[in-house]
Image (tube, rainbow, N blue to C red):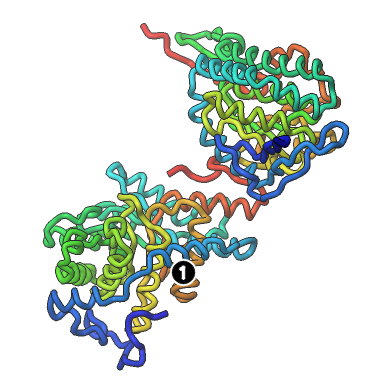
Amino acid sequence: MTHVLDPSALTGAGSLTGPLPDPFADVTRSGDAFRAFLHGLPGVDQVGAENRVKVLGTRSIKTTAKAWAIDTAISMVDLTTLEGSDTPGKVRSLAAKARRPDPEDPDCPPVAAVCVYGDLAGVAKQALVGTDVKVAAVATAFPSGRASRAVKLADVQDAVANGADEIDMVIDRGAFLAGRYLDVFEEIVAVKEACGSAHLKVILETGELVTLDAVRRASWLAMLAGGDFIKTSTGKISPAATLPVCLVMLEAVRDFRAATGRQVGVKPAGGIRTTKDAVKHLVLVNETAGADWLSPDWFRFGASSLLNDLLLQRQKLRTGHYSGPDHVSVD
Amino acid sequence: MSDRLTVRKTYKLYLGGAFPRSESGRTYEVRDAKGHFLANAAWASRKDARDAVVAARGAFATWSAATAYNRGQVLYRVAEVMEGRAAQFVEEVAAGEGISSSKARAEVDAAIDRWVWYAGWTDKLAAVLGSTNPVAGPYFGFSLPEPTGVVAVLAPQRSSLLGLVSVLAPVLAGGNTAVVVSSRDRPLPAITLGEVLATSDLPAGVVALLTGDAAEIGPWLAEHADVDAIDLAGAPAPLAMELERSAAGTVKRVLRAPAEEPDWTADPGLSRLRPFLETKSVWHPMGV
């Protein structure tokens, strides 16, 4: 069910010229036009969304499928530490864990990225030399996003200069909720430009957007502005990533690709702690956006404690007996 | 008016301070000593054991850090609450074990007294099992007993209440948390004990009472890497040997099962306290 556009009405979909994909070239010509476009997106049936994720959550994933899901989920983890108390030592130990999540088992895949504050991106980069593990840095006055644009852009440039491969920015929720969509849009465009070759993940902070309709609007806004990923939350407020929110965002990236040919990734972050949660998300990805998104290039988990639970489940499958928290590193 | 219908109880597990059904959804028939139907009990699966271990690990920090005095109070409270429900226990023990009411009454009394006995032990363990060590230097050396951690208990198969209390109470008295698999054929006193524990100020998760088959759940607990010790009281001989072998994989403390189920009325001494305590020795500078 593609809600947004009839694909047959598209001409030349797939070619990307400038920040705005073809069919939407003029939606940002004015604040009013952009608001009209975003509010013209189909409404989300909240009860239906909750029901859909509930049904998908009952899928039984066992044995070899479970082993595949666990390994895939591990390879999608953005191993995160975003505390005021982060030290270079902590970041280095996190990086070591990212390279070899389970030191006892060389077959265990590395995670996708390490996610830190911008000033520690250099430490992480150095610790990850020679691996495919990316360094993601949060920027733009994370987590609140309450700073002037100049400060936010400087934050981004600093993180990129420190070696970040990916930038996780927060949108200005205040402006979004006040209806100043074009401001938010322009800020994302400016940040994208400041990123240079670094990938941009746009954090919508869905817990502050209140409704699923707003989540859909914010998703479209971020994708139109050139975000490479849309991310649910900072992890600093509750509720963080929930399955209905993830469903809406996955529908948005699917519809966006159908309309423009450009694929955007999704990253739920915060509140995903157990293997069961992770597997539910993978099922949701497969059933909503499709198997194209089942790769670390297009789907990530922003998490810290999730990795340990995945490793415990992996050890259980490998050894045949239950493992315990003494058998994974404390972080 | 006609005779009223008895309100039949649906028996469930006691796990994490709540009374869930078995994750597997299974139940089994409990029969009295003569083979008459008594009730349906929840038939715990390995996943219930897994959840119980997670709950027990979570509760360990609180329970082991509680003062010995406080632990004694809680165990004494268990005895108090049991006393109030003695009649129900007598009925269940008499039916399950096929003994007379007066014998069952003696068993229940002994079980209640056992709680009181172990309640008294909590704050004496350090004095009896700890020591101030002689050292040849300018410092003090102390040895102190500390709880082992999460203890899996396979409760005795024959003595459904006194045996159960005799293996569970010492584990708790030392500050451990317990995952108990009840007697398979005589689970009713264990189920009622769960209700007693739930209303005795015992923090949620400290005890899980799983009704089911020790032969089915035992191997999972013996191999579980997050279980620190296992009491094989309710494991028959060939199974006990196998469990002991798999427990060695994670170097668990193992309390072996005697060949025959012992007379639980005998004074247990320290024999069931000591196996689930670790001795920590520390040295401390003497100062000036």
Q: Nearer the viewer, residue A52 or B64?
A: A52
What residue is at 48 percent from the left and 24 percent from the top?
Answer: B65
Callout 1 amino acid: Val
**Dot 1 alpha-carbon crowd within 10 angstroms: few under 14, some 14 to 19, many 20 or more:** many
Residue A313 image position (x, y, % from top left)? 57, 52
Chain for numbered disc 1: A
Residue B248 visible here: no
Q: Which residue is mark 1?
A: A285
Considering only vertical position in the picture, is B213 above or below A132? above
Residue B227 image position (x, y, % from top left)? 62, 36
Task: Choose top left, top right, bottom left or bottom right for residue B216.
Answer: top right
Considering only vertical position in the picture, is B64 above or below A96? above
What residue is at 52 percent from the left and 26 percent from the top?
Answer: B63
Residue B84 image position (x, y, % from top left)? 63, 18
Query: Would residue B288 be found to the left or right of residue B73 on screen?
Result: left
Q: Nearer the viewer, residue A234 or A133?
A: A234
Q: Nearer the viewer, residue B278 or B164?
A: B164
Quarter of the rendering occupied by the C terminus of chain A: top left
Considering only vertical position in the picture, is B4 above or below B131? below
Quarter of the rendering occupied by the N terminus of chain A: bottom left
